[in-house]
Image (cartoon, rainbow, N blue to C red):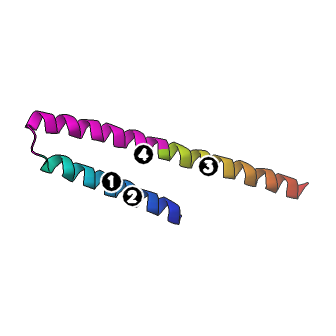
């Protein structure tokens, strides 16, 4: 549980830091909007990948526990 909170905190911090960096940079509005869209897409892909890793881990642990329970009943 602690690792997931640490990872979420890191992702949120990175997103906020990136957004502030983009917004404070002296670029044209169109360039800033393009950068925000790219960073948002990158962040979405990163979160999706981490979520899939967590789901795979839960499935693996559930399967392992199910197997152990089945063996204990035998």
On whether residue 32 falls in the magenta region, the answer is yes
Task: For the C terminus, give its image quadrant.
Answer: bottom right
Residue named by callout 2: 10
Q: State the extent of the magenta-drawn residues as a range.
A: 26-49
Label 1, secondary structure: give it.
Answer: helix
Name the disc covering residue 14, or none: 1
Q: CA distance from mark 2 to mark 3?
A: 20 Å
Query: Image quarter for residue 17?
Result: bottom left
Q: On the image, numbered disc 3 is attached to which residue?
A: 57
Q: Is residue 1 left or right of residue 69?
A: left
Q: Neighbour class for label 1 at 10 Å: few (<14), some, many (≥20)? A: few
In space, the residues marked 1 and 3 are separated at their CA atoms by 24 Å
Q: Secondary structure at mark 4?
A: helix
Cα–Cα span, label 2 and label 4: 11 Å
> Where residue 47 is drawn, which disc sits there?
4
Pointers 2 and 3 in contact (C-beta within 8 Å): no
CA gap between label 4 and label 3 equals: 15 Å
Dominant secondary structure of the residues highlighted in magenta in the image: helix
Q: Residue at x 67, y 47 (%)?
A: 60
Instruction: Indicate which label's residue lies in the foreground, 4 or 1.
Output: 1
Q: Which mark is in front, 2 or 3?
A: 2
Query: Residue 37 at what x, y percent from top left?
Result: 24, 36
């Amino acid at each position: 549980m602690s690792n997931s909170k640490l990872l979420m905190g890191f992702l949120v911090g990175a997103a906020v830091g990136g957004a502030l960096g983009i917004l404070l940079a002296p670029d044209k509005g169109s360039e800033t909007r393009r950068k925000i869209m790219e960073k948002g897409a990158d962040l979405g892909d990163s979160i999706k990948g981490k979520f899939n890793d967590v789901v795979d881990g839960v499935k693996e642990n559930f399967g392992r526990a199910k197997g152990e329970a089945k063996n204990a009943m035998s």
